[in-house]
Image: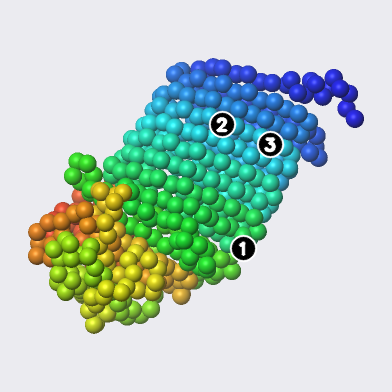
């Protein structure tokens, strides 16, 4: 047994630091070579910032609390490690911020929780690894506000969580869980004045797993049911949508959830041909590939229109809607050498589901009570089996149109065919161009902003579709 006075000395080993400072690093360690724990933190703070940190060491244990805040440009980077685990905690801010962190660590494991809030440009992330795997949580905003509660526990396995609410010009979230059996990753973001809410938890302990939910501008894009379906194999899901910004412009949001089984082999090959361009079609380089396509040659994707009160209450005729979506599908068909969409056209049905994975590709009108600014979005499910191509294999795609807006098949209000043409671009594997600086002037492309009736493809749209399908 250690002498009592030595034990008392370890109990009162307390660090207290208050400073508006620049480039400060503080490190602590406890224990011996066999059982030890350490914490190292670097602070790059401007003269507006304040910091208070309290640390107590006891044998191979460490307890730490921290409060910091300020404005200007600031960053805090902390690493806690012991026998077989490591935790990294990173915050970067340009603008106002406040952070409160609590850490309890021993040689065998650690737990860390924190609250971060601020405005301007702010990002924060927790990353943890042990012998069984890796887990992380990230959140960031540009020209906006962010409030998040994050936590991590590392002891054999790893558990991380975040509850985030942010709004601004752009925003993003990330959550990952990697194990020896599989890897799950969720990434999402928006571009344009909007907002994002997420409540996500990741676990890596033998097998990677996730639960939680997320929404963009009130649109529920992710829930635990989606994550359970993704986790069932080499499966992925993508949701892409449009929303109206307060100033009248359109913004974009997307979220991707992916599960990779570790025995998956992804061979790749190259497909490259060129379509016929037009003089008024804009730049042929203006396209983005989303990463998936329908890998069956001539897939003949069959679409349905949900005939329900939501559609009819917008003054829409189901048959006319089906014809408009069918014309949009045929426009993409004509851009490739393959038969992408069904030759039997779009079927009107009252029995198909809405925005759910049920084996049917459905276009439906939904009242998005919590998402008044969302115009439309697509949800595409795909498997991570590439079938000898560079692209993941699409399984199902659903389109959702917001009943808060006026819609028409004759060109007034928001044009069904034009919006469907854009959303079906996601269905076949193309990404959004808006919000990307190098495509700012490429609004001729269907995969850019909605600028009114746009029922023909630009050169970039054609090029992207041809690269995917030939």
From the viewer's perspective, is residue 137 above or below residue 334?
above
Looking at marks 1 and 3 on the same chain, the residue that comes earlier in the sequence is marked by 3
Dot 1: few (<14), some (14–19), or many (≥20) neighbours within 10 Å? some
Q: Is residue 441 left or right of residue 146?
A: left
Work out which residue is located at the far bottom of the displayed protein and give it.
344
The quarter of the picture where residue 402 lies is: bottom left
Query: Mark 3 highlights which residue?
Result: 105
Looking at the rendered structure, the secondary structure element under dot 3 is: strand
Q: Is residue 229 left or right of residue 379?
A: right
Q: Is residue 129 visible?
A: yes
Disc number lying in front (2 or 1): 2
User: Is 59 or 310 nearer to us in this picture?
Assistant: 310
Measuring 33% from the left and 79% from the top, which residue is drawn there?
299
* CA gap, disc 3 and disc 2: 13 Å
Query: Mark 1 highlights which residue?
Result: 181
Dot 3: few (<14), some (14–19), or many (≥20) neighbours within 10 Å? many
Q: Are marks 2 and 1 in contact (CB under 8 Å)?
A: no
* CA gap, disc 2 and disc 1: 32 Å
Tell me residue 339's x, y (percent): 27, 79
Query: Mark 2 highlights which residue?
Result: 101
Measuring 71% from the left and 40% from the top, which residue is drawn there?
82
- Which quadrant would the N terminus be assigned to in this image? top right
Disc number lying in front (1 or 3): 3
Looking at the rendered structure, the secondary structure element under dot 2 is: strand
Tell me residue 150's x, y (percent): 52, 40
Q: Are marks 3 and 2 in contact (CB under 8 Å)?
A: no
Looking at marks 2 and 1 on the same chain, the residue that comes earlier in the sequence is marked by 2
Which label is found at residue 95? none
Dot 2: few (<14), some (14–19), or many (≥20) neighbours within 10 Å? some
């Amino acid at each position: 047994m250690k002498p009592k006075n030595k034990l008392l000395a370890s109990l009162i080993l307390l660090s207290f630091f208050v400073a508006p400072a620049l480039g400060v690093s503080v490190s602590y360690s406890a224990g011996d070579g066999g059982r030890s724990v350490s914490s190292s933190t670097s602070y790059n703070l401007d003269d507006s910032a304040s910091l208070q940190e309290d640390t107590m060491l006891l044998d191979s244990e460490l307890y730490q609390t921290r409060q910091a805040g300020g404005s200007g440009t600031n960053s805090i980077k902390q690493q806690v490690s012991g026998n077989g685990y490591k935790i990294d905690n990173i915050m970067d801010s340009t603008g106002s911020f406040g952070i409160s962190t609590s850490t309890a660590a021993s040689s065998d494991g650690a737990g860390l929780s924190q609250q971060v809030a601020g405005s301007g440009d702010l990002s924060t992330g927790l990353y943890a690894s042990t012998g069984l795997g890796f887990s992380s949580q990230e959140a960031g905003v540009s020209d906006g506000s962010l409030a998040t509660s994050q936590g991590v526990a590392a002891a054999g396995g790893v558990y991380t969580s975040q509850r985030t609410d942010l709004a601004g010009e752009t925003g993003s979230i990330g959550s990952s869980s990697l194990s020896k059996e599989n890897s799950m990753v969720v990434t999402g973001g928006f571009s344009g004045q909007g907002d994002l809410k997420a409540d996500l938890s990741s676990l890596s302990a033998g097998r990677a797993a996730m639960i939680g939910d997320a929404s963009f501008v009130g649109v529920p894009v992710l829930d635990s049911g989606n994550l359970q379906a993704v986790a069932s194999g080499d499966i992925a899901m993508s949701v892409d949508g449009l929303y109206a910004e307060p100033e009248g412009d359109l913004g974009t949001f997307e979220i991707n959830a992916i599960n990779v089984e570790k025995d998956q082999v992804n061979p790749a090959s190259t497909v490259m041909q060129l379509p016929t361009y037009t003089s008024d079609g804009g730049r042929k380089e203006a396209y983005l590939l989303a990463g998936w396509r329908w890998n069956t040659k001539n897939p003949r994707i069959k679409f349905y229109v949900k005939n329900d009160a939501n559609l009819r209450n917008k003054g829409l005729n189901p048959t006319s809607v089906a014809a408009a979506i069918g014309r949009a599908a045929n426009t993409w068909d004509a851009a490739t050498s393959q038969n992408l969409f069904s030759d039997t056209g779009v079927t009107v049905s009252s029995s198909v589901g809405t925005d759910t994975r049920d084996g049917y590709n459905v276009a439906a009108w939904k009242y998005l009570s919590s998402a008044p600014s969302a115009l439309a979005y697509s949800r595409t499910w795909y498997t991570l089996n590439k079938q000898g191509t560079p692209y993941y294999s699409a399984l199902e795609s659903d389109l959702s149109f917001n009943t808060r807006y006026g819609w028409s098949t004759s060109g007034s209000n928001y044009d069904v065919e034009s919006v469907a043409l854009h959303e079906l671009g996601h269905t076949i594997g193309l990404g959004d161009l808006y919000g990307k600086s190098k495509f700012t002037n490429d609004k001729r492309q269907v995969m850019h902003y909605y600028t009114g009736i746009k029922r023909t493809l630009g050169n970039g749209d054609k090029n992207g579709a041809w690269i995917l399908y030939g």
